[in-house]
Image (spheres, rainbow, N blue to C red):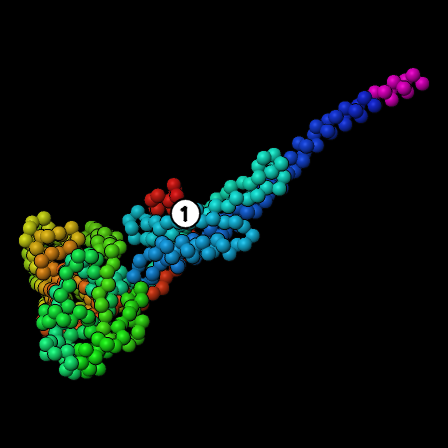
Amino acid sequence: MKNFMRSLRAALRQRGSILVLTAFALPVALAGIGLSVDAGNVYMHKSRLQNAADAAAIGGAYSGMNWKTGAFDETAAGTAAEGYLAEDNGCDLTLQKHQLFYSANKSTKYYAVRADEDVPTMFMKYFGYTNVSISAKSIAKLHAEEGTHWFNDLFIFKDKLTNVNSIDSPDNFTLTDKIRTTFDGRIRYLNKNVEIQHSTQTNKLDVFFTRTAQNSKLSVDDCKAKTGASYDENGQDTTQGGGWWSKEQYDGTYDINAYWNDHISGMISGLTSTTEQNPKETAWNTSDILYYDLNKANNNINLAIEHDLPGDATKPAYLIIKAGTTTGLSVINIDVKADTTRPLIICLDPSDVDKGSQVHMNLNGHTFSGIVYAPTMSDEGVLINANEGTFNGSLVARTLNLQGGRGHYVYAGIHEGGGTAGSGSASLTDDTSDIPGYDSF
């Protein structure tokens, strides 16, 4: 009996100890369970946030990229990215930041987003942790699957435009069928203090007439009373030929040097300069690029185009002039003696500031397809003698001088890289080793 009572008292003492231990262990166990539940919830939200960031990167890339011009609108991209994040109504997602990145050699664009979310806790809030902040980032690579072009304007000029803009009987705007020079495309200037001479024949003319106006055979006054032309962001005529005239437009944000810095300078890296002063159009039989370094060849360049340029007509040929160091260097003379269909892109280095280099082009009644890019040349800058000819493409210069009386200037998006511009794709990428700045994004 004594042994039984002794065993009973020992058992009761052990039971009391277990109750005490249980009392201490239960909150710890509950905290562990709560931590596991909250951790699982955070993990689920993290996965959803990453998926949303991926969608925002792809969607933003598509919305921001103008596949025809190669330009990227970060504002439009950010708006689209926020829209993709907002679609996940089960989460309170925030676009913390977004940015356009370039590869180290500037040849490839990437669009990156970083998204944040505050995940509310269920159990840990009792321990003072009401939410957990998480973030995710994603980056999309932009692929230009077909050709792109950089310019979506007929003329882009910085300081001055001088223009004959021929009109028969310029002293009487009421006479019919007097419009002789036409402009079909947007005209932009980049300096508020720009000098524009719409017509050297009369200071009363302040517009640029289109082919629609000329073909109507109406008077200048009647055409001015009609609807003006308008152009979308890709330079396309939104009036579908219904615009009769256009006015120049100011743009204070356009970087006139970007084409050379981001595109052309990389093309000539490693190329050997030619010293031939009088090249032939057949020079493009062997290469798409004819490159002159004026530090090595201090000559005027005279190109007579007597036949269409040889080679792939869907890809442009290039005449690239790198700046020299001597003042008063050169004139690039282009004498067009035949209609051309393969585009020729003539580029002058923007660092050739005030050194006298100029482009003189005589159309001689022919049609020329291409781009003249001379962003910093002063004085006459780019001089076009139309002489009943047609210029199809874009003129980009500090100064434009349009002479030769009657002529036609028509915007054409010159595609680079082959194919038809206007499309491309974007894909997520894990390889960010060649994207400067992304690691700290």
**Residue drawn at 90 percent across, 19 percent down:** 5
Q: Is residue 30 left or right of residue 182?
A: right
First to last magenta residue range: 1-11
Indicate the quadrant where residue 267 lies.
bottom left
Pick the front one: 215 or 207: 207
**Residue drawn at 9 percent across, 72 percent down:** 201
**What is the quadrant of the N terminus in the image?**
top right
Indicate the quadrant where residue 14 lies.
top right
Q: Is residue 156 left or right of residue 279?
A: right
Q: Is residue 33 above or below residue 70?
A: above
Pick the front one: 348 or 316: 348
Q: Is residue 325 above or below residue 190?
A: above
Q: Is residue 9 magenta?
A: yes
Give the number of marks: 1
**Residue drawn at 24 percent across, 67 percent down:** 186
x%, y% of residue 128?
A: 58, 35
x%, y% of residue 85?
A: 48, 53
Residue 82 in sight: yes
x%, y% of residue 395?
A: 19, 64
**Residue drawn at 35 percent across, 51 percent down:** 100
> Circle 1 is placed at which residue position?
97
x%, y% of residue 294?
A: 10, 53
Q: Is residue 84 magenta?
A: no
Residue 56 in sight: no
Q: Tag 1: residue type? A: Lys
Pick the front one: 115 or 342: 115
